[in-house]
Image (spheres, coloured by chain):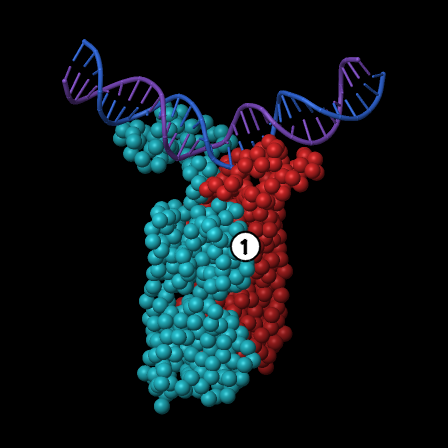
Chain colours: A red, B cyan, C purple, D blue
Amino acid sequence: MTRGRSPTIKDVAKVAGVSSATVSYVLNDLNKVTPEVDALVRRVAKELGYSRNNAARALKTGRNNIIGCILPTLTSPVFPEIAQAVQLRAEAHGYATLVIDSGNAPMREEKVVRTLAKHGVDGAVALLHPKFKLADPPIFPIVSLDAKFPGLDSVHADHYAGGRLMAEHAMALGHRRIGMLSGFQDLTSSFERRQGFVDAAAGRVELVWEVNVHLVPQLPPAAVEAIRRREVTMIACVNDLVAIAALSVLKDSGMSAPGDVSVFGFDDMQWASWPLIDLTTIRQPLADLGSRAADLLISRLDDRSRPVEDLVLPVTLVERGSTARVG
Amino acid sequence: MTRGRSPTIKDVAKVAGVSSATVSYVLNDLNKVTPEVDALVRRVAKELGYSRNNAARALKTGRNNIIGCILPTLTSPVFPEIAQAVQLRAEAHGYATLVIDSGNAPMREEKVVRTLAKHGVDGAVALLHPKFKLADPPIFPIVSLDAKFPGLDSVHADHYAGGRLMAEHAMALGHRRIGMLSGFQDLTSSFERRQGFVDAAAGRVELVWEVNVHLVPQLPPAAVEAIRRREVTMIACVNDLVAIAALSVLKDSGMSAPGDVSVFGFDDMQWASWPLIDLTTIRQPLADLGSRAADLLISRLDDRSRPVEDLVLPVTLVERGSTARVG
DNA sequence: TCAGGTCGTTTAATCGTGTAAATAGATAAG
DNA sequence: CTTATCTATTTACACGATTAAACGACCTGA
């Protein structure tokens, strides 16, 4: 009985004494057969160790039960958390997940989409650069992560509210002179975080200096100089990675947080809570982000005509040791 | 001409005025056709935007051009670097990569393998717990990462040499009283690292205390107490994550590295070089590990009868600010 | 008793490729 | 000029599943 091949639907049919169509109906839960036959087929299938050939099914139905997950990079503390959640939820729906990093370049994003298409994904969850040009017609449905995207479903944290929250907490701690390490404003989330902060702080806080930085743990010289001028009581950072870079500069310069200056992050990535870092930050629910995006994508796959949906998740303040009251 | 469907091999054949077999031969580079026909077919295929249906090919050939990459978790600084390399190399060979985390539990590993099989991967690169039970016959070829595994191809760093290197450098710096945070010895790499260290240090260094810890950035009470006893001049750690945990404990206890005690890591994960952490460590070539494993897997897919291969990659010392000369 | 309806099952076509075997066309050999 | 030998191309089937349509058995009501 143990042939080289793994058993097919026909093998199951033969052993169970029914037609292959019947087996297919049973295994797809179409409720078209009598309970006895149903039970028989399932028993035989299990006995033979049958497992459906996904390629054949994909060929016939046009659906591969694979989704893609496009992220700027995996070597960052933030994105793997999202990827993990996407994968988990997709698996629960019977989908496998192809995680790909786009290397942070908008041009590569389009190539990555084609790569995914070549491998036959049914759709994808993607953190896209706003300059990304959507193919027309779209090759497959995409759910945009982290920012609204015209024409796409999206899931993202409430960056604007997060920015406001930062400003409000800073003021509650008595800070009036603040320096800002903001991300480049072409990235939607960076823009909104800054906007929220500026709006809430308007007239009540002096933004002494501001430097646009890349979202990596190294700061450009302009930022280093600004920090060393010691003109502010708090540095508000566009995200945790940048905040860590700021902490590093402080240490190198013989200053410390929160003694000499408070440092405020954004994201609450996993390592923000390490005692060595211990960063006050705005938490965005990374895992939720991923699983909601997966849900959205899969419901889109089931109904392509549903109107575009935009899901905004709330952020919260996480107070740790890098900030202190001033005054 | 723009129908809803994407063009098939038959569409190409019709437009080019040849049979579908000819198109197939051309597109698979089988060198069976005249140069003119070859050129014609390629041109038409490009014009129509033809792209091969992977499901159909997989159905016919039994190969899906997908490999799996099984890692204990993605939310760690070490593993994503490996995953990225595997993916990159696999893509170069025309394979997509399904990255899956096994959640650190040997039982889940077997389930994950079945999941991958269900989705039709041709093989996988996997960091396996030694207790992992290989299915017999194996469902698909696996390359073992980080440790030799009976019956499997493998790629791993020279953990033993790394352990020796640690001991030698420690002695060169004058350390004679050392505490050790070793991993649990059922994990091959942890075992070998410790063994290398112990062998090289034998008779010349006093191992004042040793605590087995999990490979996470939190230490058990026994380890915390040991550190606080201040009996040693150096703490040798099984990996960087544990070293960071040790640094945290030092900070909480009002001590610092390397002033009060030196701290030595292993891995050289990305963040070990952050100024806030600045960890002396043994570097294993994570990206190489991934790409060599991918190469090995793919060559195995092409020749199942090749003898099992075991690839050992060299490690190097990276000296940073967490260690100092003593004496 | 028989037409019509219901329900469970089977028959058979199909998805897009790959590839062994058949075929035709050209070339070489006798 | 015929026959054998290649070679470029086509024909035709298989891969394993899904699913519309055909079928047959059973039931119901006039």
Numbered disc total = 1
Dot 1: element: helix
Front one among A180 and A144: A144
- From the viewer's perspective, tell me whether residue A144 is left or right of residue B11: right
Along the viewing direction, whichever of A139 and A38 lies nearer the viewer: A38
Residue A245 vs A195, above or below: the answer is below
Residue A299 locus on image (x, y percent): 61, 45
Which quadrant holds the N terminus of chain B? top left
In this view, which residue lies farthest toward the bottom? B327
Q: Is residue A139 visible?
A: no
Q: Residue at image x 37%, y 60%?
A: B155
**Above or below for A137 versus B36:** below
Give the class, few, some or many, for how many residues have Cα within 10 Å of label 1's Cα (few <14, many ≥20): few
Identify the image quadrant of the C terminus of chain B: bottom left
Residue A193 in view: yes
Q: Amino acid at mark 1?
A: Lys
Residue at 36%, 55% in the rendered image: B308
Question: Which chain does the residue under circle 1 lie in?
Answer: B
- A83 or B158, which lies in front? B158
- In the rendered structure, the answer to whether residue B146 lies left or right of residue A161 reads left
User: Which residue bears the numbered disc 1?
Assistant: B111
Q: Residue at x 47, y 63 (%)?
A: B130
Place of residue B242 in the rendered image (x, y in percent of width and height, measured from the top left): 48, 74
What is the quadrant of residue B11 in the picture? top left
Kindly identify the residue that appears in the image at 47 percent across and 72 percent down: B185
Looking at the picture, how far across and down is residue A83, in whole percent? 52, 56
